Amino acid sequence: MTNRLENARSRRLACAGCGDDFGCNPSGPCWCNDEAFRLPMPVDGSDCLCPDCLRKLAGQRTGAGAA
């Protein structure tokens, strides 16, 4: 079972990192298109990350988030 609640154009997801609810629009402009940090599409059955978790991961991977 997946955590996707899909309709024809957009979907609501539960973040794979924190569980927060957020929107995704794969058939049109989505918030993640404006992000500089990109992840490959999950292949392990997990789903996308919310904006906060994606930015935290970007900081960890680039060293900018390490304090």
Image (cartoon, rainbow, N blue to C red):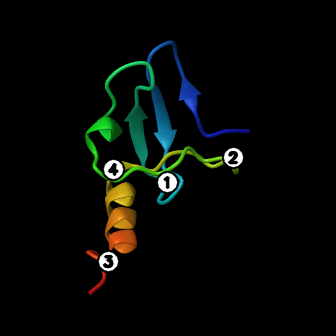
- Pointer 3: what residue? 63
Nearer to us of marks 1 and 4 is 4
> Looking at the image, is mark 3 or mark 4 earlier in the sequence?
4
Q: CA distance from mark 4 to mark 2?
A: 19 Å
Q: Are marks 1 and 3 in contact (CB under 8 Å)?
A: no
- Pointer 2: what residue? 45
* Residue 12 x/y as whole percent: 46, 32
Q: Residue at x 38, y 56 (%)?
A: 54
User: Furthest residue to the bottom?
Assistant: 67
Labelled disc at residue 61: none
- Between 25 and 18, the one lying in front of the other is 25
Callout 3: helix, strand or loop? loop
Q: Residue at x 43, y 43 (%)?
A: 21
Circle 1: residue type: Gly
> Looking at the image, is mark 4 or mark 2 earlier in the sequence?
2
Circle 3: residue type: Gly
Q: CA distance from mark 1 to mark 4?
A: 12 Å
Q: Are marks 3 and 4 in contact (CB under 8 Å)?
A: no
Give the crowd class for mark 1: few <14, some 14-19, many >=20 residues within 10 Å: few
Give the crowd class for mark 2: few <14, some 14-19, many >=20 residues within 10 Å: few
Which quadrant of the view contains residue 23? top left
- Pointer 4: what residue? 51
> Looking at the image, is mark 1 or mark 4 earlier in the sequence?
1
- Pointer 1: what residue? 19
Q: CA distance from mark 1 to mark 3?
A: 24 Å
Q: Residue at x 28, y 50 (%)?
A: 36
User: Furthest residue to the right?
Assistant: 1
Q: CA distance from mark 2 to mark 3?
A: 27 Å
